[in-house]
Protein backbone atom coordinates (compact mmCIF):
# COMPACT_ATOMS: atom_id res chain seq x y z
CA UNK A 1 0.00 0.00 0.00
CA UNK A 2 1.47 3.37 -1.02
CA UNK A 3 0.58 6.40 1.08
CA UNK A 4 2.02 9.79 2.01
CA UNK A 5 2.75 9.03 5.66
CA UNK A 6 3.19 5.96 7.87
CA UNK A 7 3.12 6.49 11.65
CA UNK A 8 4.44 3.65 13.81
CA UNK A 9 2.91 3.73 17.31
CA UNK A 10 -0.31 5.62 17.97
CA UNK A 11 0.28 6.69 21.55
CA UNK A 12 0.07 10.32 22.58
CA UNK A 13 2.57 11.62 20.03
CA UNK A 14 1.80 9.26 17.14
CA UNK A 15 -1.96 9.69 17.33
CA UNK A 16 -1.52 13.47 17.22
CA UNK A 17 0.80 13.36 14.19
CA UNK A 18 -1.27 10.79 12.31
CA UNK A 19 -4.62 12.45 13.03
CA UNK A 20 -3.54 15.97 12.17
CA UNK A 21 -1.75 14.95 8.97
CA UNK A 22 -4.86 13.00 7.90
CA UNK A 23 -6.98 16.07 8.65
CA UNK A 24 -4.57 18.11 6.52
CA UNK A 25 -5.50 15.88 3.59
CA UNK A 26 -2.50 13.51 3.44
CA UNK A 27 -3.05 9.76 3.08
CA UNK A 28 -1.91 8.34 6.43
CA UNK A 29 -1.48 4.81 7.76
CA UNK A 30 -1.34 4.60 11.55
CA UNK A 31 -0.03 1.38 13.08
CA UNK A 32 -0.55 0.43 16.74
CA UNK A 33 0.41 -2.81 18.49
CA UNK A 34 -1.56 -2.30 21.71
CA UNK A 35 -4.02 0.52 22.38
CA UNK A 36 -4.50 3.71 20.35
CA UNK A 37 -3.81 6.56 22.78
CA UNK A 38 -0.81 4.83 24.35
CA UNK A 39 0.43 4.75 27.92
CA UNK A 40 -1.03 8.05 29.12
CA UNK A 41 -4.78 7.36 28.94
CA UNK A 42 -4.69 3.63 29.73
CA UNK A 43 -1.84 3.12 32.21
CA UNK A 44 -0.22 6.50 32.92
CA UNK A 45 -1.25 10.10 33.44
CA UNK A 46 -5.02 9.82 33.35
CA UNK A 47 -5.76 6.80 35.57
CA UNK A 48 -2.98 7.65 38.03
CA UNK A 49 -4.27 11.21 38.36
CA UNK A 50 -7.76 9.77 39.00
CA UNK A 51 -6.20 7.70 41.80
CA UNK A 52 -4.43 10.77 43.12
CA UNK A 53 -7.63 12.84 43.07
CA UNK A 54 -9.23 10.11 45.20
CA UNK A 55 -6.25 9.94 47.57
CA UNK A 56 -6.23 13.71 47.94
CA UNK A 57 -9.93 13.68 48.86
CA UNK A 58 -9.12 11.22 51.65
CA UNK A 59 -6.23 13.41 52.83
CA UNK A 60 -8.39 16.52 52.86
CA UNK A 61 -11.04 14.62 54.84
CA UNK A 62 -8.39 13.65 57.37
CA UNK A 63 -7.38 17.34 57.70
CA UNK A 64 -10.86 18.39 58.90
CA UNK A 65 -10.31 17.86 62.67
CA UNK A 66 -9.06 21.07 64.28
CA UNK A 67 -10.10 23.13 61.28
CA UNK A 68 -13.71 22.37 60.37
CA UNK A 69 -15.25 19.83 62.77
CA UNK A 70 -14.79 16.09 62.93
CA UNK A 71 -14.25 13.51 60.26
CA UNK A 72 -14.02 9.80 59.96
CA UNK A 73 -12.57 8.67 56.64
CA UNK A 74 -13.09 5.09 55.46
CA UNK A 75 -11.15 4.52 52.23
CA UNK A 76 -12.60 2.24 49.58
CA UNK A 77 -10.68 1.41 46.41
CA UNK A 78 -13.82 0.09 44.64
CA UNK A 79 -15.01 3.44 43.17
CA UNK A 80 -11.47 4.31 42.10
CA UNK A 81 -11.01 1.02 40.21
CA UNK A 82 -14.49 1.41 38.72
CA UNK A 83 -13.84 4.97 37.57
CA UNK A 84 -10.58 3.87 35.89
CA UNK A 85 -12.48 1.12 34.06
CA UNK A 86 -15.59 3.09 33.16
CA UNK A 87 -14.34 6.61 32.56
CA UNK A 88 -10.60 6.51 31.83
CA UNK A 89 -10.00 3.34 29.84
CA UNK A 90 -13.34 1.86 28.67
CA UNK A 91 -12.01 -1.32 30.26
CA UNK A 92 -8.84 -0.96 28.15
CA UNK A 93 -10.78 -0.79 24.91
CA UNK A 94 -9.56 1.74 22.35
CA UNK A 95 -12.55 1.72 19.97
CA UNK A 96 -13.28 5.41 20.60
CA UNK A 97 -9.66 6.32 19.82
CA UNK A 98 -9.53 4.15 16.69
CA UNK A 99 -12.77 5.74 15.46
CA UNK A 100 -11.36 9.18 16.24
CA UNK A 101 -8.41 8.47 13.94
CA UNK A 102 -10.35 6.82 11.12
CA UNK A 103 -12.96 9.62 11.42
CA UNK A 104 -10.19 12.02 10.39
CA UNK A 105 -9.55 9.94 7.28
CA UNK A 106 -6.62 7.84 8.58
CA UNK A 107 -6.17 4.15 7.72
CA UNK A 108 -5.71 2.11 10.89
CA UNK A 109 -3.65 -1.07 11.14
CA UNK A 110 -3.41 -3.14 14.34
CA UNK A 111 -0.06 -4.84 14.78
CA UNK A 112 3.63 -4.40 15.53
CA UNK A 113 5.54 -2.68 12.77
CA UNK A 114 9.17 -2.73 11.73
CA UNK A 115 11.11 -0.71 9.21
CA UNK A 116 12.24 -2.46 6.04
CA UNK A 117 14.42 0.15 4.37
CA UNK A 118 13.79 3.86 3.75
CA UNK A 119 10.06 4.60 3.50
CA UNK A 120 9.06 0.94 3.88
CA UNK A 121 7.23 -0.46 6.90
CA UNK A 122 6.12 -4.05 7.47
CA UNK A 123 3.36 -5.37 9.72
CA UNK A 124 3.47 -9.14 9.49
CA UNK A 125 3.54 -9.73 5.74
CA UNK A 126 1.74 -6.49 4.87
CA UNK A 127 3.99 -3.76 3.43
CA UNK A 128 3.40 0.00 3.47
CA UNK A 129 5.34 2.56 1.47
CA UNK A 130 5.48 6.15 2.68
CA UNK A 131 6.14 8.67 -0.07
CA UNK A 132 6.59 11.65 2.20
CA UNK A 133 7.25 10.68 5.81
CA UNK A 134 7.71 7.80 8.20
CA UNK A 135 7.20 8.76 11.84
CA UNK A 136 8.39 6.64 14.77
CA UNK A 137 6.38 7.21 17.96
CA UNK A 138 6.81 3.93 19.78
CA UNK A 139 7.17 5.32 23.31
CA UNK A 140 8.76 3.48 26.21
CA UNK A 141 7.99 0.43 28.34
CA UNK A 142 8.69 -0.16 32.04
CA UNK A 143 12.25 -1.32 32.72
CA UNK A 144 12.74 -4.64 34.49
CA UNK A 145 16.12 -4.18 36.18
CA UNK A 146 18.51 -7.15 35.92
CA UNK A 147 18.07 -8.17 39.56
CA UNK A 148 18.63 -11.81 40.53
CA UNK A 149 15.29 -13.55 41.03
CA UNK A 150 13.06 -10.71 39.72
CA UNK A 151 12.23 -12.14 36.29
CA UNK A 152 9.48 -14.72 36.52
CA UNK A 153 7.94 -13.30 39.69
CA UNK A 154 4.48 -11.67 39.45
CA UNK A 155 5.86 -8.21 40.19
CA UNK A 156 3.76 -5.17 39.33
CA UNK A 157 4.57 -2.38 36.91
CA UNK A 158 2.50 0.80 36.64
CA UNK A 159 0.15 -1.18 34.37
CA UNK A 160 -0.74 -3.71 37.09
CA UNK A 161 -1.14 -0.96 39.69
CA UNK A 162 -3.60 0.85 37.43
CA UNK A 163 -5.54 -2.37 36.75
CA UNK A 164 -5.74 -3.40 40.44
CA UNK A 165 -9.29 -3.91 41.70
CA UNK A 166 -8.08 -4.46 45.26
CA UNK A 167 -5.00 -3.17 47.04
CA UNK A 168 -2.53 -5.37 48.90
CA UNK A 169 -2.01 -5.18 52.65
CA UNK A 170 1.64 -4.26 52.07
CA UNK A 171 3.55 -3.03 49.01
CA UNK A 172 7.25 -2.67 48.27
CA UNK A 173 8.12 -0.10 45.60
CA UNK A 174 11.45 -0.13 43.76
CA UNK A 175 12.04 3.45 42.64
CA UNK A 176 11.65 6.82 44.32
CA UNK A 177 11.11 8.87 41.18
CA UNK A 178 7.88 10.59 40.16
CA UNK A 179 5.93 7.43 39.29
CA UNK A 180 7.07 5.50 42.38
CA UNK A 181 6.30 8.36 44.75
CA UNK A 182 2.91 9.26 43.26
CA UNK A 183 1.80 5.64 43.54
CA UNK A 184 3.37 5.21 47.01
CA UNK A 185 1.43 8.11 48.47
CA UNK A 186 -1.92 7.34 46.91
CA UNK A 187 -1.83 3.61 47.68
CA UNK A 188 -0.74 4.28 51.28
CA UNK A 189 -3.65 6.68 51.71
CA UNK A 190 -5.97 3.73 51.03
CA UNK A 191 -4.48 1.82 53.97
CA UNK A 192 -1.67 -0.21 52.38
CA UNK A 193 1.64 -0.38 54.26
CA UNK A 194 4.10 1.01 51.70
CA UNK A 195 7.92 0.87 51.60
CA UNK A 196 9.91 2.73 48.94
CA UNK A 197 13.44 1.57 48.03
CA UNK A 198 15.57 3.94 45.93
CA UNK A 199 19.09 3.41 44.62
CA UNK A 200 20.07 7.08 44.35
CA UNK A 201 21.15 8.96 47.47
CA UNK A 202 17.88 10.90 47.49
CA UNK A 203 14.25 10.69 46.33
CA UNK A 204 13.35 12.62 43.14
CA UNK A 205 17.08 12.58 42.44
CA UNK A 206 16.80 14.61 39.23
CA UNK A 207 15.16 17.56 40.97
CA UNK A 208 16.34 20.18 43.50
CA UNK A 209 17.58 18.82 46.86
CA UNK A 210 14.79 20.86 48.50
CA UNK A 211 12.27 18.85 46.46
CA UNK A 212 13.84 15.59 47.63
CA UNK A 213 13.69 16.76 51.22
CA UNK A 214 10.03 17.75 50.91
CA UNK A 215 9.15 14.41 49.28
CA UNK A 216 10.95 12.56 52.09
CA UNK A 217 9.20 14.57 54.81
CA UNK A 218 5.85 13.95 53.12
CA UNK A 219 6.37 10.19 53.00
CA UNK A 220 7.52 10.12 56.62
CA UNK A 221 4.53 12.20 57.77
CA UNK A 222 2.18 9.70 56.13
CA UNK A 223 3.87 6.64 57.64
CA UNK A 224 5.50 5.52 54.38
CA UNK A 225 8.93 4.01 54.96
CA UNK A 226 11.61 4.95 52.45
CA UNK A 227 15.22 3.90 52.03
CA UNK A 228 17.63 5.70 49.70
CA UNK A 229 21.07 4.62 48.46
CA UNK A 230 19.92 0.98 48.58
CA UNK A 231 20.98 -1.37 45.79
CA UNK A 232 18.74 -4.37 45.43
CA UNK A 233 20.78 -7.52 45.00
CA UNK A 234 18.01 -10.15 45.03
CA UNK A 235 14.26 -10.62 44.88
CA UNK A 236 12.55 -13.73 46.28
CA UNK A 237 8.92 -14.70 45.90
CA UNK A 238 7.55 -17.66 47.86
CA UNK A 239 4.18 -17.79 46.13
CA UNK A 240 2.71 -15.42 48.69
CA UNK A 241 5.16 -12.68 49.65
CA UNK A 242 8.10 -10.85 48.11
CA UNK A 243 11.41 -10.41 49.88
CA UNK A 244 13.86 -7.82 48.56
CA UNK A 245 17.49 -8.05 49.64
CA UNK A 246 19.76 -4.98 49.64
CA UNK A 247 23.19 -6.01 50.94
CA UNK A 248 22.57 -7.06 54.55
CA UNK A 249 19.00 -5.70 54.73
CA UNK A 250 15.76 -7.39 53.69
CA UNK A 251 12.32 -5.94 53.10
CA UNK A 252 9.14 -7.92 52.56
CA UNK A 253 5.68 -7.21 51.24
CA UNK A 254 2.63 -8.83 49.66
CA UNK A 255 3.27 -7.12 46.32
CA UNK A 256 6.28 -5.58 44.63
CA UNK A 257 5.89 -2.61 42.28
CA UNK A 258 8.85 -1.93 40.01
CA UNK A 259 8.98 1.76 39.07
CA UNK A 260 12.67 1.90 38.25
CA UNK A 261 12.50 3.73 34.93
CA UNK A 262 11.34 3.20 31.39
CA UNK A 263 13.14 2.40 28.16
CA UNK A 264 12.54 2.64 24.44
CA UNK A 265 12.39 -0.81 22.87
CA UNK A 266 14.25 -0.12 19.64
CA UNK A 267 15.79 -3.56 19.06
CA UNK A 268 12.95 -5.00 16.95
CA UNK A 269 12.16 -1.85 14.94
CA UNK A 270 14.48 -2.63 12.02
CA UNK A 271 16.45 0.59 12.53
CA UNK A 272 19.49 -0.96 10.84
CA UNK A 273 17.51 -1.03 7.55
CA UNK A 274 17.52 2.78 7.54
CA UNK A 275 21.12 3.16 8.69
CA UNK A 276 20.38 3.78 12.39
CA UNK A 277 21.79 1.97 15.41
CA UNK A 278 19.34 -0.67 16.71
CA UNK A 279 21.30 -0.81 20.01
CA UNK A 280 20.67 2.88 20.75
CA UNK A 281 18.75 3.77 23.92
CA UNK A 282 16.78 6.55 22.22
CA UNK A 283 16.22 7.82 18.69
CA UNK A 284 18.34 10.91 18.17
CA UNK A 285 16.41 13.75 16.53
CA UNK A 286 17.28 17.28 15.44
CA UNK A 287 15.24 20.32 16.44
CA UNK A 288 12.64 19.53 13.72
CA UNK A 289 12.25 15.98 15.05
CA UNK A 290 14.09 14.53 12.06
CA UNK A 291 15.78 11.19 12.73
CA UNK A 292 16.90 10.56 9.15
CA UNK A 293 15.87 11.10 5.51
CA UNK A 294 12.08 11.40 5.41
CA UNK A 295 12.12 9.91 8.90
CA UNK A 296 10.81 11.70 12.02
CA UNK A 297 10.46 10.60 15.65
CA UNK A 298 8.36 12.07 18.46
CA UNK A 299 7.61 11.34 22.11
CA UNK A 300 9.35 9.29 24.79
CA UNK A 301 11.40 7.44 22.16
CA UNK A 302 13.43 10.64 21.52
CA UNK A 303 14.68 10.79 25.13
CA UNK A 304 13.93 14.50 25.48
CA UNK A 305 11.60 14.03 28.46
CA UNK A 306 9.07 11.25 29.06
CA UNK A 307 5.99 13.43 29.36
CA UNK A 308 2.75 13.68 27.46
CA UNK A 309 3.27 17.41 26.98
CA UNK A 310 6.65 16.74 25.33
CA UNK A 311 5.13 14.14 22.98
CA UNK A 312 2.36 16.61 22.01
CA UNK A 313 4.82 19.48 21.61
CA UNK A 314 7.17 17.45 19.44
CA UNK A 315 4.20 16.23 17.39
CA UNK A 316 3.41 19.88 16.58
CA UNK A 317 7.00 20.54 15.49
CA UNK A 318 7.10 17.39 13.31
CA UNK A 319 3.72 18.16 11.73
CA UNK A 320 4.90 21.64 10.71
CA UNK A 321 8.08 20.22 9.26
CA UNK A 322 6.32 17.45 7.32
CA UNK A 323 3.75 19.87 5.92
CA UNK A 324 6.41 22.47 5.15
CA UNK A 325 4.73 25.01 7.43
CA UNK A 326 6.70 27.73 9.16
CA UNK A 327 7.22 27.25 12.89
CA UNK A 328 9.95 27.52 15.48
CA UNK A 329 12.33 24.62 16.13
CA UNK A 330 11.97 22.53 19.29
CA UNK A 331 13.11 24.40 22.40
CA UNK A 332 13.24 22.59 25.73
CA UNK A 333 14.64 25.43 27.87
CA UNK A 334 11.54 25.76 30.02
CA UNK A 335 10.63 22.05 30.05
CA UNK A 336 8.03 21.65 32.81
CA UNK A 337 7.42 18.52 34.89
CA UNK A 338 5.19 17.89 37.89
CA UNK A 339 5.29 15.10 40.45
CA UNK A 340 1.65 14.92 41.47
CA UNK A 341 2.22 14.13 45.12
CA UNK A 342 0.38 16.14 47.74
CA UNK A 343 2.06 18.67 47.90
CA UNK A 344 2.62 18.83 44.14
CA UNK A 345 6.27 19.28 43.22
CA UNK A 346 6.63 21.06 39.88
CA UNK A 347 9.74 22.33 38.16
CA UNK A 348 10.66 24.00 34.88
CA UNK A 349 13.98 24.59 33.19
CA UNK A 350 17.28 24.02 34.98
CA UNK A 351 17.91 23.05 38.57
CA UNK A 352 20.50 25.07 40.46
CA UNK A 353 23.18 22.41 39.98
CA UNK A 354 22.43 22.06 36.24
CA UNK A 355 22.74 25.83 35.86
CA UNK A 356 26.10 25.78 37.68
CA UNK A 357 27.31 22.88 35.50
CA UNK A 358 26.55 25.06 32.46
CA UNK A 359 28.90 27.69 33.88
CA UNK A 360 26.20 30.31 34.43
CA UNK A 361 26.52 32.99 37.08
CA UNK A 362 23.82 31.54 39.28
CA UNK A 363 21.70 33.28 41.87
CA UNK A 364 18.79 31.69 43.70
CA UNK A 365 15.84 32.87 45.77
CA UNK A 366 13.53 30.76 47.90
CA UNK A 367 10.22 31.39 49.65
CA UNK A 368 8.30 28.94 51.83
CA UNK A 369 4.57 28.38 51.37
CA UNK A 370 3.70 28.14 55.10
CA UNK A 371 5.29 31.60 55.59
CA UNK A 372 3.18 33.19 52.85
CA UNK A 373 -0.23 34.69 53.70
CA UNK A 374 -2.10 32.09 51.69
CA UNK A 375 -0.04 29.22 53.06
CA UNK A 376 -0.62 30.39 56.61
CA UNK A 377 -4.37 30.67 55.96
CA UNK A 378 -4.42 27.23 54.31
CA UNK A 379 -2.73 25.68 57.38
CA UNK A 380 -3.14 21.85 57.26
CA UNK A 381 -1.34 20.51 54.21
CA UNK A 382 0.45 23.77 53.41
CA UNK A 383 3.98 22.42 52.98
CA UNK A 384 5.93 23.67 50.00
CA UNK A 385 8.30 26.27 48.61
CA UNK A 386 9.18 28.26 45.52
CA UNK A 387 12.79 28.25 44.38
CA UNK A 388 14.07 30.43 41.57
CA UNK A 389 17.29 29.92 39.63
CA UNK A 390 18.54 32.97 37.76
CA UNK A 391 21.31 33.65 35.29
CA UNK A 392 22.66 36.83 36.89
CA UNK A 393 24.58 37.89 33.77
CA UNK A 394 21.47 37.94 31.59
CA UNK A 395 19.07 38.93 34.39
CA UNK A 396 16.53 36.19 33.60
CA UNK A 397 15.21 33.04 35.25
CA UNK A 398 16.58 29.78 33.84
CA UNK A 399 14.84 27.42 36.25
CA UNK A 400 12.26 27.24 39.00
CA UNK A 401 10.62 24.79 41.35
CA UNK A 402 7.17 25.27 42.77
CA UNK A 403 6.00 22.86 45.46
CA UNK A 404 2.82 23.20 47.43
CA UNK A 405 -0.92 22.53 47.49
CA UNK A 406 -1.21 23.84 43.90
CA UNK A 407 2.49 23.67 43.05
CA UNK A 408 1.89 22.46 39.50
CA UNK A 409 -0.47 25.36 38.77
CA UNK A 410 1.80 28.02 40.26
CA UNK A 411 4.53 26.60 38.04
CA UNK A 412 2.68 27.93 34.98
CA UNK A 413 3.68 31.53 35.69
CA UNK A 414 7.29 30.52 36.26
CA UNK A 415 7.42 28.47 33.05
CA UNK A 416 6.19 31.54 31.13
CA UNK A 417 8.90 33.69 32.72
CA UNK A 418 11.62 31.18 31.81
CA UNK A 419 10.30 30.48 28.31
CA UNK A 420 9.79 34.15 27.41
CA UNK A 421 12.99 35.25 29.20
CA UNK A 422 11.10 37.96 31.06
CA UNK A 423 13.73 40.29 32.59
CA UNK A 424 13.97 40.00 36.39
CA UNK A 425 13.57 43.76 36.53
CA UNK A 426 10.10 43.42 35.02
CA UNK A 427 9.12 40.50 37.25
CA UNK A 428 10.23 42.46 40.31
CA UNK A 429 7.64 45.12 39.51
CA UNK A 430 4.72 42.80 38.88
CA UNK A 431 1.48 42.77 40.89
CA UNK A 432 0.72 39.32 42.35
CA UNK A 433 -2.88 38.92 43.59
CA UNK A 434 -3.33 38.68 47.36
CA UNK A 435 -3.63 36.13 48.94
CA UNK A 436 -2.79 33.57 46.25
CA UNK A 437 -0.24 30.80 46.35
CA UNK A 438 1.46 32.32 43.31
CA UNK A 439 2.10 35.49 45.31
CA UNK A 440 4.95 33.44 46.81
CA UNK A 441 6.78 34.09 43.52
CA UNK A 442 7.07 37.75 44.62
CA UNK A 443 8.59 36.64 47.94
CA UNK A 444 11.09 34.39 46.14
CA UNK A 445 12.00 37.25 43.76
CA UNK A 446 12.72 39.48 46.76
CA UNK A 447 14.95 36.75 48.24
CA UNK A 448 16.70 36.49 44.88
CA UNK A 449 17.31 40.26 44.75
CA UNK A 450 18.59 40.19 48.33
CA UNK A 451 21.12 37.48 47.44
CA UNK A 452 22.87 39.78 44.93
C1 LIG B 1 2.41 5.78 35.67
C2 LIG B 1 2.69 6.88 34.70
C3 LIG B 1 2.21 8.14 34.96
C4 LIG B 1 2.46 9.18 34.07
N1 LIG B 1 1.99 10.41 34.37
C5 LIG B 1 2.25 11.44 33.52
C6 LIG B 1 1.77 12.74 33.80
O1 LIG B 1 1.09 12.97 34.81
N2 LIG B 1 2.07 13.75 32.93
C7 LIG B 1 2.80 13.52 31.80
O2 LIG B 1 3.04 14.47 31.05
N3 LIG B 1 3.27 12.29 31.51
C8 LIG B 1 3.01 11.26 32.34
N4 LIG B 1 3.47 10.00 32.03
C9 LIG B 1 4.27 9.82 30.79
C10 LIG B 1 3.39 9.68 29.54
O3 LIG B 1 2.48 8.62 29.69
C11 LIG B 1 4.29 9.43 28.33
O4 LIG B 1 5.27 10.42 28.27
C12 LIG B 1 3.49 9.45 27.03
O5 LIG B 1 2.54 8.42 27.01
C13 LIG B 1 4.46 9.30 25.86
O6 LIG B 1 3.77 9.26 24.65
P1 LIG B 1 4.43 8.52 23.40
O7 LIG B 1 3.50 8.76 22.26
O8 LIG B 1 5.84 8.87 23.27
O9 LIG B 1 4.42 6.97 23.81
P2 LIG B 1 3.29 5.99 24.31
O10 LIG B 1 2.15 6.70 24.91
O11 LIG B 1 4.00 4.97 25.13
O12 LIG B 1 2.77 5.31 22.97
C14 LIG B 1 3.61 4.53 22.16
C15 LIG B 1 2.75 3.51 21.44
O13 LIG B 1 3.50 2.85 20.46
C16 LIG B 1 3.08 1.49 20.40
N5 LIG B 1 4.16 0.71 19.78
C17 LIG B 1 5.39 0.47 20.28
N6 LIG B 1 6.12 -0.22 19.39
C18 LIG B 1 5.32 -0.42 18.31
C19 LIG B 1 5.52 -1.06 17.06
N7 LIG B 1 6.70 -1.62 16.72
N8 LIG B 1 4.48 -1.09 16.20
C20 LIG B 1 3.27 -0.53 16.51
N9 LIG B 1 3.05 0.09 17.68
C21 LIG B 1 4.07 0.15 18.56
C22 LIG B 1 2.81 1.14 21.84
O14 LIG B 1 1.92 0.03 21.92
C23 LIG B 1 2.20 2.44 22.36
O15 LIG B 1 0.78 2.44 22.32
C24 LIG B 1 3.21 8.94 32.89
C25 LIG B 1 3.69 7.65 32.62
C26 LIG B 1 3.43 6.64 33.50
C27 LIG B 1 3.94 5.27 33.18
Image (spheres, rainbow, N blue to C red):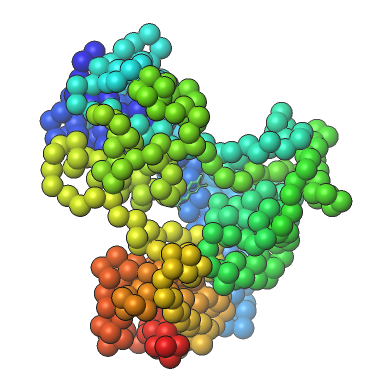
In-front residue for pair 231/347: 231
Q: Residue at x 17, y 49 (%)?
A: 327
Residue 253 x, y percent position in the rendering: 77, 47
Q: Residue at x 84, y 52 (%)?
A: 249
Residue 438 x, y percent position in the rendering: 38, 78
In the rendered view, would you say 157 is above or below 249? above
For residue 315, what is the image quadrant? top left
Q: Residue at x 19, y 31 (%)?
A: 22
Residue 399 x, y percent position in the rendering: 41, 69
In this picture, residue 99 sits left or right of residue 115? left
Q: Is residue 55 visible?
A: no
In the rendered view, would you say 338 is above or below 82? below
Residue 256 x, y percent position in the rendering: 70, 43
Q: Quadrant of ligand 1?
A: top left
For residue 97, what is the image quadrant? top left
Q: Is residue 357 visible?
A: yes
Image quarter where the C terminus lies is: bottom left
Image quarter where the N terminus lies is: top left
In the rendered view, would you say 225 is above or below 25? below
In this picture, residue 253 sits left or right of residue 366? right
In-front residue for pair 295/19: 295
Amino acid sequence: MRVDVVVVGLGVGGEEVAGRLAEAGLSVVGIEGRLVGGECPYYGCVPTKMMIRAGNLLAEGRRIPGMAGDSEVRPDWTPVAKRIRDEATDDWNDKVAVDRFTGKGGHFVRGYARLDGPGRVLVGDEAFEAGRATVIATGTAPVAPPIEGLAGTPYWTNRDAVEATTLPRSLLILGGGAIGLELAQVIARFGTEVTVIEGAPRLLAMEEPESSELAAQTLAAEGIRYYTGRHVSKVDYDGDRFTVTCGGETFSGDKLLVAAGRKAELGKLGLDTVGLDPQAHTLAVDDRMRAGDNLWAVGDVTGKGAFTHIAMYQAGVAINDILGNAGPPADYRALPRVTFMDPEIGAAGLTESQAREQGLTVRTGLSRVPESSRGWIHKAGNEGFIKLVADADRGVLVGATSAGPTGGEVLGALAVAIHAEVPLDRLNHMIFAYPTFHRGIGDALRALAASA
